[in-house]
Amino acid sequence: MRTLTVAGLLLLAGASLEFGAGAGSTEAEPDANALGEGLGLLREAAAADDLLYRMIGQMIMVGFAGDDERDQSVKAVRIQLAQGAIGGVVLYPDNIRSAPELRLLTAFLANAKSELVPLIAVDQEGGVVQRLTRRKGWVYFPSARDVGRDPKLNTPDGARRLYGRMAQETARAGINLNFGPVVDLSVNAGNTVIVRRKRSFGSDPTTVAALAGAFIMAHRDANILTAAKHFPGHGSSWSDSHKALPDVSLSWRESELEPYRRLARDGLLDMVMVGHLYHPRFSDGERLPASLSARAIAALRADGYIGFKGVVVSDDLEMGAVRESYSLADRVIMAVNAGTDLLVFSNVTSRDPELGVTIHAIIAEAVRDGRIPRARIEEAYGRILLLKRRLMQHDLAGRW
């Protein structure tokens, strides 16, 4: 991006540095005013270009290979964090060894000396979805369904104590973003990805909102951000978005929005993750998933509907629901234009150390040629900047 832009800036400066002849002189002399104006334009354009580079970087989170600061892929993402090419990373099982080893890894990434604190994220829900596993030395936490059914845990106080222990352990590992809680409702007993895997607190939206709120507050106490998922509701689907696009047109229920409404009303949403789900009410076109549709995010943000004004994060944009139908560039551009602020790519298949750089270049090129409005980047950056400042100030309770 910068090579192309610098070339353009030089042309711009050259066009502005006109030379004129002084009165009575036979030799051309530099026009001081034009020279000053040209250099001023060059500086302004270079500053604008650098700001755009940094704003785009904050919108990108990627997975990576390696579990040690000596691994080349780990070094690569640390350099990208330091340069502002990406704004965060996501940890997966092959990045995680023992607690001391993970702490060294996250400290290495956090100390990249980036302008804003890097996001270091993990999926730590409890039950079958927890990256910090008992096998590797961490505490086991029950699934959301088991929490919802246990009288000792299914109160706001009981859940907050439980998730307080989870959050403290996660924070000690150097992680500052947990992709949870799941606020999907158990409305389809045949659902394989949420209900049968015990990832939902239950079918009652009031209970789900209360327990999810306890999860969020416990993590805020430990200065860890959370992301409620998967809007507009994955608990009614008949298929798994990791593999194919679920069509929830006939099974989805209005009640699946209620946890988001309650959490937004109470100021308890740091981020909302939009799922790869198809419903015409949340889609811009035939079988276009909510994650790539402006209509879905407009519903999430609308006053009197959900009214969430904070950071919208994508579900993994390499999942089967979107990967098979859209190119990398299409996924990136469509997600950004739909209103997604933070793009997540697991990178678990290719483990490409330069994936973040590639995504950055796709966005930058789309801004240059007008496919993505610069205002969309500025809007996303503003939300991320506010959230990261709260994280850096240990003050996550502010309302949007």
Image: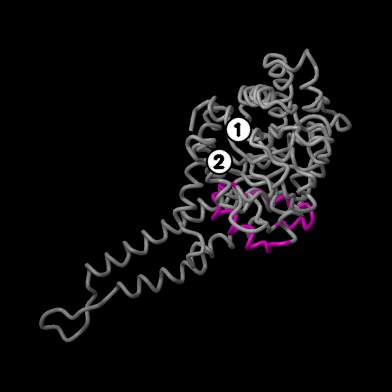
Observer able to see residue 131 = no
Residue reaching furthest to the front:
250
Residue under the image location 68 percent in, 25 percent down: 215
Count of numbered tags: 2
Residue under the image location 52 percent in, 29 percent down: 393
Is 330 magenta? The answer is yes
Q: Residues within 10 Å of mark 2 (few under 14, many from 20)?
A: many
| Residue 378: x %, y % from top left | 46, 50
| Residue 263: x %, y % from top left | 58, 28
Task: Measure how far apart labels 1 and 2 are at the Cα level.
Answer: 9 Å
Where disc 2 sits, the SS reads helix
Q: Quadrant of the N terminus?
A: bottom right
Magenta residue span: 325-353
Is 289 magenta? The answer is no
- Report the front residue among 232 and 4: 232
Query: Amino acid type of disc 2?
Result: Leu
* Left or right of residue 56: residue 199: right
Where disc 1 sits, the SS reads helix
Residue under the image location 65 percent in, 23 percent down: 206
Residue occupied by mark 2: 300
Residue occupied by mark 1: 260
Which is nearer the N-term, disc 1 or disc 2?
1
Q: Residues within 10 Å of mark 1 (few under 14, many from 20)?
A: many
Observer able to see residue 23 = yes
Q: Are marks 1 and 2 in contact (CB under 8 Å)?
A: yes
Query: Amino acid type of disc 1?
Result: Tyr
